[in-house]
Amino acid sequence: MAFPTTRMRRLRSSPALRGLVRETELRADKLVLPLFVSQTAGEREPIEGMVGIERLPISAAVQEAREAAELGLGAVLLFGIPAEKDPEGSGAYDEEGVVQLALRAIKRELPELLVITDVCLCEYTTHGHCGVVREDGVLDNDETLELLARTALSHARAGADIVAPSDMMDGRVGAIRAELDSEGFSHIPILAYSAKFASAFYGPFREAAGSVPAFGDRRAYQMDPANGREAVREALLDVEEGADMVMVKPALAYGDLIRALARATRLPLAAYNVSGEYAMVKAAAAAGALDERAAVLEILTSLHRAGADIVITYHAKDAAKWLSQTA
């Protein structure tokens, strides 16, 4: 009788056998590349906390999108950095805003490439919060919903294939779904940031997008990292309101919730491998503490193994190149 360990050694005895029985297969078309598009940048601007990632003028965003398509990535995800900000974040829903302009430019050149847009106000508000803030300093959830719906609609009009609300306001998926449906965009899917945690891993992103809150923090509307059952409830509420896909953000410390949401919702699930997670790997690799290629591919594979159908990651281009070399 063959012992299980002996059997598995036989199945690992050659690369062909290992490939044949591999349970989780990482592919480039399951990866999404985030892009920071700046309305004021005249050229590419390096982001100090994110080696290899840049704030992009629209022309460079088109170039990055073209490279993403050539590498076989599944999509790009656009974040906008406006020329001006105001308390209501009006640049988010301006028909001539930076994301809207970038969308049109990318779609003119690459009509087949899937483009996802982040729907939030934090990059556009002077106070850096994700919605309208009242005079007493409290965020007004209901007033924010109208602006988020207007933002999603403006993105759809400009050519977005998927809209992704990341604000964590109560009821925002339903408000966006109703707005899109009423304006003839019922075919546009919503990827909801359903389980977005008040995480320590967002620091480099906030530098990149210029969205550090001017006061307080986002713990009143982003989730407590200690609450797993709440994450499932939030995701199921988004599904009821019309979400077509759900997301867990961040990724590395939340594999249990990736698995839980995948089972609970039975919808396509995205995991966002966020800026701080990217920066940690880059720093460790630069220090010679680990092999970057091996670490990145292991991380991304683990997220798929946990249940993520889609991984949003700043490593996407490098990962696609590495995967093509091993194919």
Image (cartoon, grey):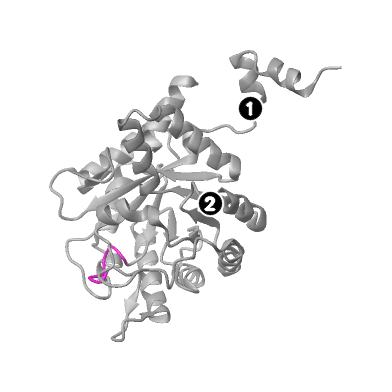
In the rendered image, the quadrant that contains the N terminus is: top right
* Residue at image location 37% in from the left, 31% down from the top: 318
Where 256 falls versus 84 (above or below)?
Answer: above
Q: Residue furthest bottom?
A: 136
Q: What span is in magenta?
A: 122-127
Across and down, in percent, residue 317 comes to 37, 34
Determine which of the numbered discs, if any, sits on residue 22 in the image. 1
* Residue at image location 48% in from the left, 58% down from the top: 188
* Residue at image location 24% in from the left, 59% down from the top: 210
Q: Going by the image, does 22 lie left or right of 100? A: right
Residue 99 is one of the magenta-drawn residues = no
- Looking at marks 1 and 2 on the same chain, the residue that comes earlier in the sequence is marked by 1
Residue 123 is one of the magenta-drawn residues = yes
Q: What element carries label 1?
A: loop
Across and down, in percent, residue 191 comes to 49, 57
Determine which of the numbered discs, if any, sits on residue 254 in the image. 2
Badge 2 crowding class, 10 Å Cα cut-off, few under 14, some 14 to 19, many 20 or more, is: some
Q: Going by the image, does 63 lie left or right of 260? A: left
Q: Which residue lies furthest to the top in this view?
A: 14
